[in-house]
Structure formats: structure tokens, C-alpha cells
Image (tube, coloured by chain):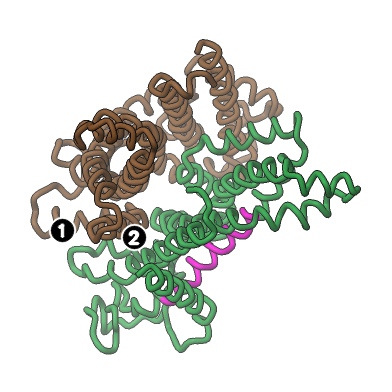
Amino acid sequence: MLMRLVSRLALALVVALGVASLVFALIHLTPGDPVEAMLGESATSVDRAALRTALGLDAPLSAQWWRFVRALADGDLGRSLASQRAVATLIAERLPQTLVLALAAMGVALALALPLGLYSALRAGTRWDLFTSTLAVLGMALPSFVLGPLLMMVFAVQLGWLPVAGGDTPAALVLPALTLGLALAALLTRMVRAAVCEVLSEPYILAARARGLGAARVLWRHALRNAALPVLTVVGLQLGALLGGAVITEMVFGWPGLGQLTIEAIQHRDYPLVQGCVLTVSLGYVGLNLLTDLLYGCLDPRVRGL
Amino acid sequence: MNRLTTRVCALIMLGWMGCALLAPLLPLAPNALDLTALFAPPDASHWLGTDDLGRSIAARVIAGARVSCGVGLAVMTLSLVLGVSVGVACGMAGGVGDLLGARVIDIFMAFPGILLAIALAGVLGPGLDNVIVALCCVSWVGFARLARAQTLAVMARDHVLAARTLGSRRGYIVTHHLLVLIAAPLLVEASFVLASAVVAEAGLSFLGLGAQPPLASWGGMIRQATQFMVVAPYMLLGPCLALMSLATSANVLGDRLRDAWQLPR
């Protein structure tokens, strides 16, 4: 168990360093001069050289990379070019909003997917199963920038029940959480259905039934506990994906989270801020993957020995 | 029922591909302004209505298929070639080379795809070329992981061992023994990549990072429609249905292929 923990941690560290380097490369190796983009074409060469030195862009790339990694280890993500504030502070201000949105969306998704998926699995092959499966396939192809405006039109504009946009009131959370949550619910419903169907065909379910256990007991004690494992993995991975996938939804609803900050940074060509935002979300994703992996080992004795 | 769904999906897919190919030849004027018919609701002359500049939405939806299908197919093909090359090279190399390759794949898998695409497209600047580059950077890794795993499995089989013992060259083994065996799962993955690339392109165009006006694209049209949602809600209908029908068809066809070839989920 300890060996597994250490090796997984080491692997996650390697991946995290790789992710950081890739984000660094994204900003530094892509064509286009950030200094040119920031100052515009009218700037003099003296101004450009001064900004280049101030940003440390005149050093060799390897030296810049090393400084970037060392600063990162200290939690220093540099300064925003637009507002001159620390990138870490700007991100810390917006991150909680994105986390709230991601958790609310996951709540919506689980509340829908668990009962729907379970019921479909128990009624596999019936019309009800076909109906939910079709709904799930359609839901998975429904992008947030289609569903978001549709929900907004019905519930905010026509009915006036909820605010159109913003992030000040709890009511403003409902539509963005539904937008993200419904698409995820479609995916999770399929997962839950597949997992329960698979477990129900296992020999130990037959054995439990043969011993005369009631249907409910077989389902709760034997089937669901085992079906929960693959579902848990997907929940963990999707929670990480939600951090990055919320960008478009945040833009649709004007939700003041990390996604909106990323787009603002891109629009202002604020490279350190873009770098910080992408890095934060990606490292969060790596962390959640690691956590899911370790949790899986704790819950499933079969994985522990690996 | 299943057969019918598959046929309908194949028809929808062929229909959009046909639109994409034939759009320049059809008598459409997706960019023609008609200031006497601003925000005209759907009727006989404008099937899906007109937008804020009086342009026919139906014509723009058909013209937009060219962007969606073009970007989707380009991303699918380029990332298939790149991903399979990397994956097969890793699987064939074994040892340190494979270990390094596997870590690179892990690193790319660690990015939430859409965010990397948005950041890349944002840094590279708006435009469809950059969208294709950004989406390829995200999509190749799925192919690479799959191709690597499949290569490792096939290379351990007896007939490959026999071919090697007989002195077949690596290139011959790859083309005659490996690629034919791993083609099926890769094709299934390709149909899912097509679906997600179409949706991702629309998302980037929605954010203003993809197709630039006045070029008709479904994502750009959805963005425009959301601005006039209160006065002209029907503007959303055409591009939304088009996007969903193409993406769903590609997904369903992928599912069906996987079932038909009895591949694991």
C-alpha cells in the first residue's frame, strides 16, 4: 500500500512538472511576440527592450524555464500585465466561484444520474431504458453554449424566475449549475447503467440470490457497492474536467469564476495570467486524478495489491 | 429500431458532408444583406428566418456546414496520423523510448482538453487554421494512447513473432500485421473525435476565437443569436439543431461500429 502511494505520488509529480513545462512552452514557443502584442506597433525599440528586460524575456529560454519552475515551487505565478497584481491573488479571488459551480453541477448530475441509471439498469431492454438511453445520447451532444442560452431564454427571459446572469446571489447559481450538470448527468447515467448491468451479471449476484437473499438486499449490499467503483472514477475525473470545462458556461452566464478570468486574460493578451489560469486548472486536474486513483485503491481490495 | 437509428444517423452525416462539399456550388447567398428583412421570422422565403443584418439563416446554416465538417475532418485526420505514429512508435520501440513516450501521453492526458484548446487558440490568435492546430494538440493523445496499448498487445501475438522469426522488416510488420488489426478501435475513436472536434470548433467560434465574421459558422451564429435572444429567439434554432444533429450522428455511428465489431467500451 505504501509503495503504491509513493509510486503514484512520484508519477503525479512527474506529470505535474510536465504539465507546467507544457504551459510554459505554450506561452513562450508559440509564434507572435508578447511584447509586440502588449505595446502595439507604435512603441519604440527602447520601450520594447525595457519591457523585455522587465519581464525577463531577454534571458535564454532554459534560464527562463528554470526561473519559472522555481517560482512555481514557491507558489509565485508572476504578475498580471494588465492590472499589475499578483496572478496568484487574482486566481485565489476567482477560484472559489468556479469550485462552487463545479460542485453544484456535480450535485445536479448525481441527483439525476444515480436514480435514472439504476432504474434503467433494472429495466434493461425495456422502452424506459431506450428512452433514457436516447435522452442520454442527445444530452451528451448538447454543448453548454446551446443549453445555456436555451435555459436562459425559458427560465430567465420568458418566465423571469431566475436572474439572467451574474454571480452575486444564490439564485444566479441555478442556471449555470443546471447547464453543466445536465450534460454531465447524461454521461453519468450511461456509466451508472453500464456499471450496474455488469455487476448484476456477475456470478456472486447469482450466488447471493441462490442463498435466498431478498432482491433489495442483493441490490444494496452486493450490487451497488461494487457498481460504485467505476462510477466513482468517472465522478473524480469529471470533477477535474468541470474545472476547465466551465469556461464556456461561465462566459454564457457571466459567472465570475476562473474561466471568465482566463478569457479576459486571453482578450487582454495578459500572458502571465493566461499561464497561471491554465496551470491552476491543469494541476487541480492532476491532483483530482491522483486522489481518485488512491481512493479507488482504498475502496477496492483487488486494486490494493497492484 | 437500432438499424433505423443507424441509417438515420448515417443519412444526417452524409447530408451535412454533402452540404459542406456542395455549399459553394448551390445558389446560396449566406453573406447577402437585406436591410428590408431584418429579424424576419421563419416563413416560405426564409425557412429559418433572417438575422440582425437580414441574412438568410438557412443559407448560413448550410454554408456553416463547410466550416464544421472541414474543421472536424481535418482535426480527425491530422490527429489520427500524428497519434497513431506516436503510439505505434512507442509500442514498437519498447524500453526507455516507450517509457518516455508513455509519460508524454500522460502529460497531455492531464490537461482538460477544451481549456488547452481555448488557451492555445487564444495565444495563437483567432482563425480557423489556429483552431485546427489547437484541437489537434488536444485530440492526438487519445489516438496515441489507444494505438500504443493495441500495438503492445498485437506485438505479443504469435503470428507477429512468426513474422519476425521469418525475418520480416519492422515496416512490413507494421503495415501488414499491425495496422490492419488495430484499425477497428482507431476508427471508432475517430468518429468520437470527429463529434467532439465539431462541438469544440463551435465552442471556440462561440467565444470569438474561431471563424471570424462574416464567415458563416454554427458556433458564431449561436453567439450572435444569444445577443438577440429576446427579440428573435428563432435565430437559435437552425445552428443549434445543425450542430447537435451532426455531433449526435457521429457519436451514435461510433457506438454502433463499436458494438458491431464487439470492441470493449
Residue at image x 29%, y 46%? A185
Question: Crowding at label 2, few (<14), some or many (≥20) Cα neighbours within 10 Å?
Answer: many
Q: Chain of mark 2?
A: B
Which residue is disc 2 drawn over? B223
Location of residue A285 in the rendering, given as x and y in whole percent from the top left corner: 44, 31
Classified by dominant secondary structure, the portion drawn in magenta counts as: helix
Write down the colour of chain A: brown
Q: Is residue A178 visible?
A: no
Q: Residue furthest top?
A: A2
The amino acid type, in three-letter code, at marker 2 is: Arg
State the green chain: B
Describe the element under mark 1 as helix, strand or loop.
Answer: helix
Disc 2 from disc 1: Cα separation = 17 Å
Residue at image x 26%, y 78%? B38
Of the 4 image quadrants, the one containing the N terminus of chain B is bottom left
Location of residue B178 in the rendering, given as x and y in whole percent from the top left corner: 73, 52
Residue A266 vs A94, above or below: the answer is below
Describe the element under mark 2 as helix, strand or loop.
Answer: helix
Residue B8 vs A294, above or below: the answer is below
Which residue is disc 1 drawn over? A154
